[in-house]
Amino acid sequence: MRDVRDLLTNPICSADELGRPIPESPYAVSTCLPTWADAVGYEEREPHVINALAAGYPRFVYHPTCQELFDRCTKQHAGLGQDTLVLVSRGAAERFARYLGDRSGAVCSAYDLGLGGEHVVCFDREHASIAKEYWQHTGEGISARQADCALRDESSNSAEQAKQAIRRRLAACHGEHVADEDVLLFPTGMTAIYTLHRALLSIRPAGRAAQFGFPYVDTLKVLQKFGGGALFYPNDDATDLRSTLDANEILGLFTELPSNPLLLSPDMAKLRDLADHADAPLVIDDTIATCVNANLIDVADVLCTSLTKAFSGVGDVAGGALILNPKSPWADRLRAALGSIYEDTLFGPDAVVLEANSHDFARRVSKMNDSAERLADHLVTHPKIANVHYPKYRTPDRYNALKRDSAGFGGLMSIELRNPETCAPVFYDALRCCKGPNLGTNYTLVCPYTILAHYDELAWAESCGVSRWLIRVSVGLEPPEELITRFDEALDACD
């Protein structure tokens, strides 16, 4: 049995490790993009980069095991010029078919895989890019473990004991008034947001969502592409906000604490007031802060979170959750709306891994808090750093108002270098940390965020204050002194 690579001391980051899974697991949810040019090459679909990928973030890249299953399903079910995808349920397959039909006029056919409810969908190959949009935005595609079982023609149990342990762990994190049944689990964080958005549309079919703050890319895509679209306030500085909300039927007010990737905290008291004025639920994504650091359940009507990130930490499984505030005036309406559409599609073996990974969730977050704050304090005074985006320095009063006693600022920051056109790629290439998408991992993970998330809309992202040269840093469990040394070495390379 080969030794498991220690990513704290031996990160996956060298130029000859392009495409290597991070971590070294067949179910890794990240992949190594060791140079800035590799990240651009990934976005440009350059063959030498794409062909090297042995893994990838599962909503952005079809895992090789999933692709193997698609190929088998294509041979068995598809017609001439068709491709297939496998979705987590019959309902997901029907929603996928509607999405494809609405955007292309295509007609799909679907087949039960005959195992645990997963469905094969056949569609014309010319619509593959639209099909990929649905897979990415909604997270309703099957996981790599699911594909593994399907290729072996094996069904799996629902792992209800592991799921109940996860629900209990999340409920306890939010306080004694949150019960296990207030927690709903999903295969990805985006599936949680997408399902909540569908539930809100069932309450107000003509409504529009309002997004406050520049959010994670696919959150905004879901709000914009499904239903009646979204009102977007990237800088939390819209004027005449009440009149704007009065002129629209509002599904819900969506925000993050802090935001990804700028780590800004919204004025939550103002948003709570606006939500009450609009008679709409306030939806907060606490993935970055985590429930360990921030007490948000009392101000939110519902929380959404990605369990792929710090809750797991390992980076070898995906998951998501919604946490309902039982004291919210929206609680009964949300329970009823979600109850009519909710499907438990978190794959059993994935739930078992999530539960095992999350035993020390709070301890790990506390250690990440300390290391990240030490690193941020060092970088904010460094002469080659132009900006450090971190809750301690960006809207700190707003974050501190919601921070738990003895908690911290989280493990995520974003940095901008001086002379970024020259220095950002040099710094990134030289940095001795794991390099790839994802965050909240037990090992430090760095990526050129705007390049990977907004490559086709860089000018728009910059108009919202997100530099194309921004580098996002997710701090892990390495000793802070070691991280400071590595960052200083990479900054020295800029000379």
Image: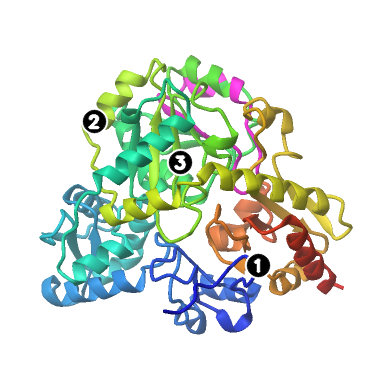
Name the residue nearer the viewer: 189 or 466. 189
Q: Which callout, 3 or 1, points at the residue further toward the start of the chain?
A: 3
Label 3 with label 1: CB-CB less than 8 Å = no
What crowding class fits label 1: few (fewer than 14 Cα within 10 Å), some (14-19), or many (20 or more)?
many
Residue 256 is inside the magenta segment: yes
Badge 1 marks a residue whose secondary structure is loop
Task: Give, as a three-letter code, the residue at label 2.
Answer: Gly
Q: Is residue 212 visible?
A: no
> What mark, if any, has residue 305 been given in the picture?
3
Residue 151 is inside the magenta segment: no
* Whole-percent x, y for residue 343 in the image: 23, 42
Furthest residue in direction front, as rendered: 1
Which residue in the structure is indicated by mark 2? 339
Task: Give, as a three-letter code, the residue at label 3.
Answer: Thr
Name the residue nearer the viewer: 261 or 381. 381
Which image quadrant is residue 133 in?
Answer: bottom left
- Magenta range: 242-269
* Whole-percent x, y for residue 410 in the image: 63, 43
Task: Report the Cα–Cα distance between label 3 and label 1.
Answer: 26 Å
Badge 2 marks a residue whose secondary structure is helix
Task: Give, as a three-letter code, the residue at label 1.
Answer: Cys
Label 2 with label 3: CB-CB less than 8 Å = no
* Whole-percent x, y for residue 474 in the image: 62, 55
> What mark, if any, has residue 433 been given in the picture?
1
Q: Which callout, 2 or 3, points at the residue further toward the start of the chain?
A: 3
Residue at x-position 37% and y-position 55%: 353
Q: Is residue 112 visible?
A: yes
For residue 62, above or below residue 463? below
Name the residue nearer the viewer: 275 or 332. 332
> What mark, if any, has residue 23 been given in the picture?
none
Task: Report the Cα–Cα distance between label 1 and label 2.
Answer: 43 Å
